[in-house]
Amino acid sequence: MTAAVRELPFAAPLLAVDRVELLEQGAGPRLRASKLVTIEDPYMAGHFPGLTMLPAVFLLEGLRQAVARAFDLADPPELLQVRSARLLAPMLGGDEITLDAAVEPQPDGARWAIDARCTRADGTPVARLKVLVGVPGEADAITAPTAPPEPVDGAPVIDHVRIRELLPVRHPMLLVDRVDSLDPGRRISTVKAVTGSEPCYQSLPEGLSAAGYAYPRSLVFESFGQSAALLWLASTGAGVPDGVLMLAAMRGCRFAGGVQPGETMRHVVRLEQLSSGAAFLSGEIWAGAQCVAVVDQLIAVNRPRADVRAAP
């Protein structure tokens, strides 16, 4: 079965796959999908202005959308776990990315463990993703290792103007509004207000359930990653970086609940280790008093912009 992706009945930052194919093989079903990286897509112009590059989190969004199309689900599927993710090479404007995934149906019939290899058209590997995608349920409950961050009254530690100076992203991809607390070298707490006027809610059909309006978990991860970048920059004391801060890997990321328009999303990020050109971080994501995600490990790297542009 092959299908062109035209529209989605749930909030999404963009059409993250152009075509989806479900193959039945002896070893089990496989998903194949493709995506052309183009600056014309929503959110893309704000991601590293002057350098068209697909955010790594949009590969995760692509797997979610591929599952939704291939299995024709009545309820929106969600990214439930990122068991491991390794980002191997940048995905630049004009690249066509192919996602080739082994799919293991879970016993409940509404979840799929996915092992995906992502490559450019020239065969260059760009990512290896092991995730769990499916319809959320009570089994997704998680216990946060810490208490929720307290709302902070008064002036932020870092305001939006300074955030714009530090992060090389712009509207609508700039997903941190303020920094409420900061302990350089150790911890940061940030805020992102989710509103119903964001581009991910544009052109949705009427009559959707609340699940259809859940803030895309790919953008939740991106917001967490930008918070991690702010902690890294504050911890090095080097100011605005010369290179491109990029996601290199994730492990042990679990979701339990979503974020709805009108809610305030709060990130708590901890710096576990800082080495030359790389940072190792962990943390939690909150919607009010509910912990909606735990990130066991996120690895970020700083690559020279010239190296990214010259990637083979």
Image (cartoon, rainbow, N blue to C red):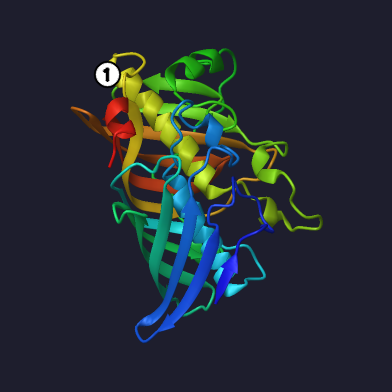
Where 227 falls versus 64 (above or below)? above
Q: Horizontal and vertical percent for residue 308?
A: 31, 33
In the image, residue 172 lies at what x, y percent? Answer: 59, 32
Quarter of the figure with the N terminus:
bottom right
Q: Residue at x 30, y 44 (%)?
A: 89
Per the image, label 1 sits on a secondary structure element best described as helix
Residue at the extreme bottom of the image, as rendered:
26
Instruction: Give the residue displayed 72% in from the left and 44% down from the top.
Output: 202
Looking at the image, how many numbered discs can be counted on the residues? 1
Q: Amino acid at mark 1?
A: Thr
Above-or-below relation of 302 to 14: above
* Above or below for 54 versus 68: above
Depth check, front residue: 16 or 93 = 93
Q: Position of residue 179 (x, y in %)?
A: 49, 22
Q: Which residue is mark 1?
A: 236
Identify the residue at horizontal 69%, vertical 36% (top origin): 195
Q: Is residue 219 above or below residue 240?
A: below
Query: Residue 27, how many percent across, how many down?
Result: 34, 83
Label 1 CA crowd tier, 10 Å (few <14, some 14–19, many 20+): few
Residue at the image position 62 percent from the left and 72 percent from the top: 72
Q: Quadrant of residue 81?
A: bottom left
